Image (tube, rainbow, N blue to C red):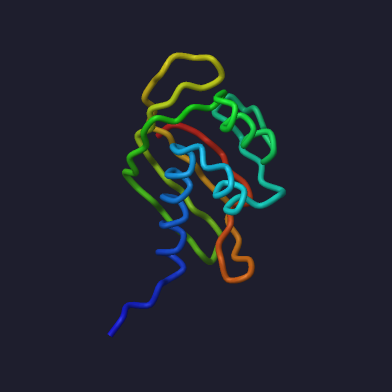
Amino acid sequence: MSVPYTDEQQLKDLYNEMWQALLAKDISTLEKIHADEFILVHMTGMQQPKKEYLRCVRDGELNYFSARAENIFVDTGAGKLIGQSKVEAAVFGGNKHTWNLQLAFDVEKRGGSWILIFGRASTY
């Protein structure tokens, strides 16, 4: 008997897929899993729409070297996905640093798949 692929597991997999794509600079996967209207609010409060955010990943303004998930919280009813990961990155010309990075996402199921709508970065 197979275990059903729950929405909770789909969202946890989406979080991990996002990190794999960020580490690989896999823009086509990132395009697919972020809604066209996606906005990321960085720790500094700067807001980046999807196109600008993905351009920064592609062009090396946002460089991610490693990410190890420590906690992933899901509330499918509220459309929330919160991931806490140890992330090694160099962003916007800064030095490589390791952060306890929390990404809190609003998510929505579209066409049978979950997609990232809005994200807010902070530390934990």
Question: As drawn, is 8 to the left or to the right of 106?
Answer: left
Instruction: Please say if 72 is above or below 75.
Output: above
Tag count in the figure? 0
Question: As drawn, which residue projects farthest toward the bottom?
Answer: 1
- Image point 39% across, 20% down: which residue? 97
Point out the residue furthest to the left here. 1
Residue 24 position, x and y percent, is: 45, 38
Q: Is residue 110 above or below residue 52?
A: below
| Residue drawn at (70%, 50%) of the image | 36
Residue placed most toward the observer, 1 or 39:
1
* Quadrant of the frame with the C terminus: top left
The quarter of the picture where the N terminus appears is bottom left
User: Image quarter for residue 74?
Assistant: bottom left
Residue toward you, 57 or 107: 57
User: Residue at image x 38%, y 32%?
Assistant: 87
x and y percent of residue 78 in the render?
56, 61
Question: Which residue does the image show at 62% across and 48% down from the upper left?
Answer: 31
On screen, residue 76 above or below 47: below
> Where's residue 38, x and y in %?
66, 46
Q: Position of residue 19 (x, y in %)?
A: 44, 43
